[in-house]
Amino acid sequence: MKVIETPVAGVKLIEPKVFGDHRGFFVETFQKNRYQAMLDIDVDFVQDNHSRSSKGVLRGLHFQRIKPQGKLVRVVRGEVYDVVVDIRVDSPTFKKWVGVHLSEDNHHQLWVPPGLAHGFLVISDIADFEYKCTEYYDPASEACLLWNDPEIGIDWPVDEPLLSPKDLQGKLLRELF
């Protein structure tokens, strides 16, 4: 497995080793000791989630204020453009963002440390997205950064995504902090 640092502090792209032949493939998607050593983290995952979305759906940019979640994310069907925004005011990369393509074909994963805003846009007709979380989902703690906040300037590959009512009401960064 290969771990690649990104421009956002702590966010790491993971390229797992894929063993494939004419029968299909095998890939290890998580092994606690190896992942903790290679990502330089010491966390326990307490919740796994799986979402399915259609083309053009944008979910995010979500985070939890009181109980921030670290996330290990991957796509098991289709392709997404996955985005992380550093909203940690004391971080050297505050307000910076990174976007990567995650797909069933590239098998890449992304480690998103606690305290960052996260979201994704579905590129394929349908996408199944899985993520492991370091904290339980807490509705009272959840918040949403507006997907097109001009202060952040994310270069999404779409102009008019499909958003939930909740995500449509995301806040600008200056309104959150």
Image: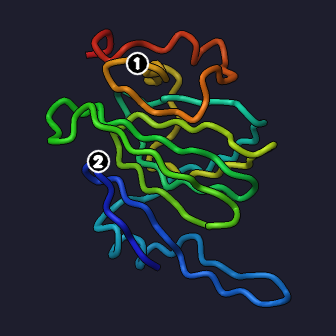
Which residue does the numbered mark 1 point to in the structure image? 149
Dot 1, how many residues are within 10 Å of its Cα: few (below 14), some (14-19), or many (20+)?
Answer: some
Q: State left or right for residue 14 relative to residue 50.
A: left
Quarter of the rendering occupied by the C terminus: top left
Q: Are marks 1 and 2 in contact (CB under 8 Å)?
A: no
Residue 141 drawn at (x, y percent): 43, 23
Residue 170 drawn at (x, y percent): 49, 15
Number of marks drawn? 2
Residue drawn 65% across and 55% down? 75
User: Which residue type does callout 2 highlight?
Assistant: Val
Q: State left or right for residue 49 relative to residue 23.
A: left
User: Which residue type does callout 1 highlight?
Assistant: Asp
Q: CA distance from mark 1 to mark 2?
A: 18 Å
Q: State left or right for residue 168 relative to residue 164.
A: left
Dot 2, how many residues are within 10 Å of its Cα: few (below 14), some (14-19), or many (20+)?
Answer: many
Which residue does the numbered mark 2 point to in the structure image? 8
Of all residues shown, which one is farthest toward the right?
23
Residue 130 drawn at (x, y percent): 64, 52
Where disc 1 sits, the SS reads: loop
Residue 129's tag is none
First-in-chain label (1 vs 2) = 2
Residue drawn 69% across and 42% down? 123
Residue 169 drawn at (x, y percent): 53, 10
Where disc 2 sits, the SS reads: loop
In the figure, residue 96 lies in which quadrant?
top left
